[in-house]
Image: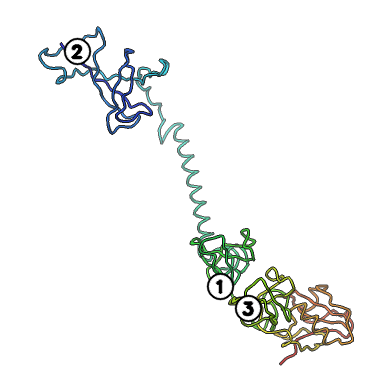
Amino acid sequence: MAQQQMLITLHVPPGARPGQVWPFYLPDDRRIELPIPDGLRPGDPFSAQVPYPPGAIPPSAPPTVPVAAVVAVAAPAVAVAAGAPARHRPPDIAPLPPRPKGDGFFGGKVVGVHWGKLVAVLVAVVAVIVVVVVVVAPGGGGGGGGRAGYCKSQDTPCLASWSDPTLAGCETTQSGCTACDGGYHWCCTRDGCQDEGVGWCECHEGVADPPGAEDPASAAPGACLNAALSCLDAWSDDTLDGCDGVQRGCEAAACDGDPTPWCCVDEGCAGQDEGWCYCEPGTFEAAAEFVKVVDAACAEGHVATTLQECERAANDLFPGGYKGVHVNLFPAETPFGCGYSETDVHFNPETDSTATSYPASWTEDRGSICRKPE
């Protein structure tokens, strides 16, 4: 008579794969080998038929019925993968202890833990929303006042023309604030484009109006738009195609094709608003006639706005010589621009000066040096 079988429940061991023959230990310490059924993963349960232990009394069954057709179902047993030491075999499962009173979402210790986490999550969510509203909201916060072509975090304009060969899409010439790399809008604010907040920034889309654009008279022909400097009468830059020939002052058409006229202000021609600048087209000689205005500020649009302009004006007005140009000695007591006291010449670069006359302690021969009205 064939040996009767019992049905047991097993679990796929870690690392076992379908089709593999894997050894198992039964609760009575017998070792068996069974194939891992298809479609199962480690930890999945499956059932298998194994012979009853020796000496065990199987359930009664009609002896004429083949074992393959009748399975005597015994209580499910738990098997352990072979090779596991006995101390790792799972113990008998004991019933769970009663649930403590109040140990739920609305009572006892667990309540405190859940509510604490909930409050922490809500605070974090609110903080994120506030940051998004302040930083991402169009025109919200930051410098530049929401002006096109200005940084969001500082009152700094984007370069009118720039590129960054290290980023795909930005290696070609960009104008103002763009999203050339497919991300948010940003721009270079200095040559080299290094370091956020110094050489580049996140910005408001568009091109910034050049400083002085709202008041064309604020920049003289051949003068820088946003620095108290003026163009060299003759200059060249052999590092740029088209600029290796002699340029005169601020050419209306930039030698390198830049949409905004620019010029060199010193021989090195390095660094925006230091060695070069964007400028008002023309040459200094075109506006090189000056007059003295006794003890008063220059009329609007006739201020000598740069130190170089002041020096050249002093050369014209004091053919016998002067004692030099003193810079920023009396910023709050003198008008913006070029002034004189006999043969002492002064230049005040403070554009926000509200002074309209000169200190009474100066000589009687004192006043401003102004561009001559046309």
Q: Is residue 294 above or below residue 203?
A: below
Instruction: State which quadrant residue 85 falls in.
Output: top left
Q: Give x and y (percent) for residue 105.
A: 41, 36
Earlier in the chain: of badge 2 and badge 1, it is 2
User: What label sits on residue 207 in the rendered view?
Assistant: 1
Say left or right for 112 vs 9: right
Q: Give x and y (percent) for residue 84.
A: 40, 19
Disc 3 crowd rating (10 Å Cα; few below 14, some 14-19, many 20+) is: many
Disc 2 crowd rating (10 Å Cα; few below 14, some 14-19, many 20+) is: few
User: What label sits on residue 3 in the rendered view?
Assistant: 2
Residue marked by disc 3? 255
Q: Give x and y (percent) for residue 143.
A: 60, 65
Q: Is residue 49 above or below residue 58?
A: below
Q: CA distance from mark 3 to mark 1?
A: 21 Å
Kindly report which numbered mark, 2 or 1, lies closer to the viewer in this rendering.
2
Amino acid on which the number 2 mark rests in the picture: Gln
Q: Residue furthest bottom?
A: 374
Say left or right for 108 vs 368: left
Badge 2 element: loop
User: What label sits on residue 64 in the rendered view?
Assistant: none
